Image (cartoon, rainbow, N blue to C red):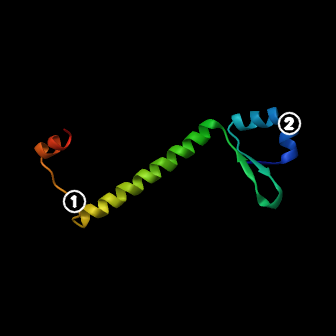
Amino acid sequence: MVAIKTVDIRNDFKRISDIVMGGEKVLVSRPRNENLVIISESDYNELEKAKRNAEYYKKLDVSLQQVSRGKVVVKSMEELEDMSK
């Protein structure tokens, strides 16, 4: 990860953009530790995908716990078809 100051972003945005597009992450130091990280769109998309997957796995874990405790509802195929009408 490359660390830079806010003023460097203003003065050299193209070079910093090229660094990010080359796969590097850039930490922008700001006052009061309100720092930023610049990443490529593809890296961002991967982070969002991982976040969604983690949320999905958490729901699966809750469902498995409910099944193991017997908290399920059993329906026949006919009952399910009737519910969809």
* Side (left or right) of 72 relative to 46: left
* Side (left or right) of 49 relative to 27: left
**Which mark is drawn over residue 12?**
2
Q: Residues within 10 Å of mark 2 (few under 14, many from 20)?
A: few
Question: What SS does tag 2 mark?
Answer: loop
* Relative height, residue 47 to residue 15 (above, below): below
Real-space CA distance between mark 2 and mark 1, rounded to the nearest whole angstrom:
59 Å
Q: Position of residue 67 (x, y in %)?
A: 25, 61
Figure quadrant of residue 60: bottom left
Question: What SS does tag 1 mark?
Answer: loop
Figure quadrant of residue 62: bottom left
* Relative height, residue 62 to residue 75 (above, below): below
Looking at marks 2 and 1 on the same chain, the residue that comes earlier in the sequence is marked by 2
* Side (left or right) of 59 relative to 22: left
**Which mark is drawn over residue 29?**
none
Residue toward you, 74 or 16: 74
Give the residue type that dot 1 points to.
Val
Q: Position of residue 70 (x, y in %)?
A: 21, 65
Residue toward you, 17 or 52: 52
Name the residue beneath numbered marker 1: 72
Give the residue type that dot 2 points to.
Asp
